[in-house]
Amino acid sequence: MISVYDIYSVSLLIVSLSLFVVRYLRQDPPILPYLVIACVCAVGNWLGELGGGWAAMALLVAASFLFLSCLLYPEQVSRNGANGKSGKDQPAGSAGES
């Protein structure tokens, strides 16, 4: 039988993985936040099926907030840029220079 936890976790997993694939094609995103979302979706679904409703919903809501942070603030999630340095660490005259 399909439950709310199944729908919530699978839809969150599909949306976050599609966001990761789109960002992977355009830039170099960090893998760890998306991996955490996938693991939390699996554990939340498992807890929901075993009857741990509050814990499962709390985990899935926390994963949703992590997804929103990946969606709205992608540069904040990865502390290092693509070349290993963030733009704030570079002097003002050397931004974009190799």
Image (cartoon, rainbow, N blue to C red):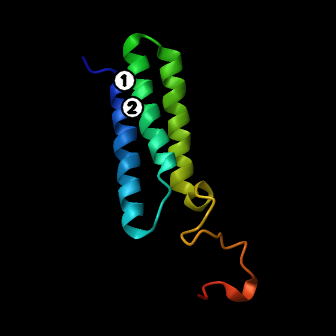
Q: Where is residue 35 in the image (x, y as percent from the top left)?
A: 45, 43
Query: In the shown orientation, is residue 74 left or right of residue 49?
Result: right
Residue 78 sits in quarter = bottom right
Query: In the shown orientation, is residue 91 left or right of residue 44?
Result: right
| 82 shown above or below 79 | below
* Residue nearer the viewer, 86 or 66: 86
Residue at x-position 34% and y-position 44%: 14
Q: Are marks 2 and 1 in contact (CB under 8 Å)?
A: yes
Give the amino acid at mark 2: Tyr
Residue at x-position 49% and y-position 24%: 57
**What residue is pinned by disc 1?**
4
Q: Position of residue 67 (x, y in %)?
A: 50, 45
Query: In the shown orientation, is residue 33 left or right of residue 41?
Result: right
Residue at x-position 63% and y-position 59%: 79
**What residue is pinned by disc 2?**
8
Label 2 secondary element = helix
Q: Distance between the residues labelled 2 and 1?
A: 6 Å
Query: In the shown orientation, is residue 95 left or right of residue 18?
Result: right
Label 1 secondary element = helix
The local crowd at label 1, few if under 14, some if 14 to 19, many if 20 or more residues have their Cα within 10 Å, is few
| 72 shown above or below 89 | above
Give the amino acid at mark 1: Val
Please identify the quadrant where the C terminus is shown.
bottom right
| 86 shown above or below 15 | below
Q: Position of residue 15 (x, y in %)?
A: 37, 46
Q: Where is residue 42 in the image (x, y as percent from the top left)?
A: 39, 29
| 40 shown above or below 3 | below
Residue 25 sits in quarter = bottom left
Residue 40 bears which disc, if any? none
Please identify the quadrant where the N terminus is shown.
top left
